[in-house]
Image (cartoon, helix red, strand yellow):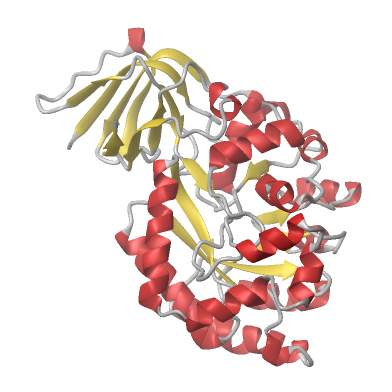
Amino acid sequence: MSQLLLKNIRQLVTVSAGGKPHKTGPAMRDLGVIEDATLLIEGQTIRWAGPAREFSLQLGDDAEVIDASRFVALPGFVDSHTHLVFAGSRESEFAMRSEGKTYGEIGRSGGGILSTVEATRKSSKRDLKQLGATRLDAMLRHGTTTVEIKSGYGLDPDSEIKILETISELSAEQYTTVVPTFLGAHAIPPEFKKNPDDYVDLVCRRMIPHVSRRKLAVFCDVFCEDGYFSVEQSRRILLAAGDSGLKIKIHADELAPSGGSALSAELKAVSADHLEHIDDGSIGRLRESGVIGVLLPGVSFFLNHRYAPARSLIEGGVPVAIASDFNPGSCMSFSMPLMMTIACTHMKMTPEEAVTACTLNAAAALSLSHEYGSLEVGKKADVILYEIPNYRYLPYHFGANHVAMIIKHGTILEFR
């Protein structure tokens, strides 16, 4: 079995959770930082992690040894909420917002989600796959080694399956770990504008069973919001998804207090995402149900919208994650370090909380924290080395890519 030894690591940020699937409250600030550390990787997994002075294991003759004294090592970032497979772009809407148009006004005038739906429906699977592969490569170069990708820009059976097949092929061919999510309930398609319940029936009775039968998704998501899908419509879709063996996520309380957070607690969803308008009662329900709260600071920054109440969520005992929500309309960025910076400057999270939210808790939002999100013995060896003086420098020096080495499943992919 191949061995890779990283020795004399300036800082090893383990984000160790002691076997727990996520961190909450004050524990989010405990990153398990080890100065002058050693990390031994055997095959795809971590064999040993700790202070260099304590390392005494025997290496094989063909072991690769790297002096990491200039680097800070962190777990690969886990981006638990993206809409990465899409065609077209919406820079014209960006310009409209700069002139005072709101997200809702742009959508009602023919822009928004439906404009991307039109472009994506017209694109071939080959073209979507090429776009997706390029984006995944760029995300990997910025330290993201695990990515959730949603469908949702098809909104008809053939187009949604085309997107999910694209995601499946990307998962098989790219180094990045890819988690597929079915988001057929992203918006009401124009052909069902006058009878949205008929579209809900189509999602429940035809699309979900097909997706489940072909194992094209792990999760089912729904945009529970006024003008999109009501609480009752969302409940129908998610119950159908659960009955078909799909795990549950919800776009909740993004534009207004929609009831999505309470629904996520009721259905024991894996995560409730956005939460910009969550109320105190729903925070308590999330804590009691164990739902991961996924916050998307890039969206609030890009749209100049209200930010999710990160401090109330953390102090209320909700396990908080951060994701990019990379998409063409509300966050055209996949940089997790930038999301950390925004979380620190606009949501009052500490750098330590932001690191936990982008790694261990983000992996928990994908039910993957038993394998990813921390640098602990037995977990997959997804390690990023940064040429920075300490981990706090990462969100501090924003707008630059500090990645020096990418290690995915124990294999060095890039080293400069």
Q: Quadrant of the C terminus?
A: top left
Q: Position of residue 94 (x, y in %)?
A: 68, 59
Q: Position of residue 346 (x, y in %)?
A: 75, 36
Q: Residue at x 50, y 69 (%)?
A: 217
Q: Residue at x 56, y 50 (%)?
A: 333
* Viewer can see residue 184: no
As drawn, 315 above or below 306 = above
Q: Residue at x 68, y 42 (%)?
A: 320
Q: Position of residue 58 (x, y in %)?
A: 19, 19
Q: Quadrant of the N terminus?
A: top left
Q: Residue at x 34, y 7 (%)?
A: 53
The residue lying toward the viewer, choosing from 138 and 146, is: 138
The residue lying toward the viewer, choosing from 91 and 376, is: 91
The residue lying toward the viewer, choosing from 151 and 313, is: 151
**Number of residue marks:** 0
Q: Toward which corner of the image does residue 24 lie, by quadrant?
A: top right
* Viewer can see residue 309: yes
Residue, far left = 61
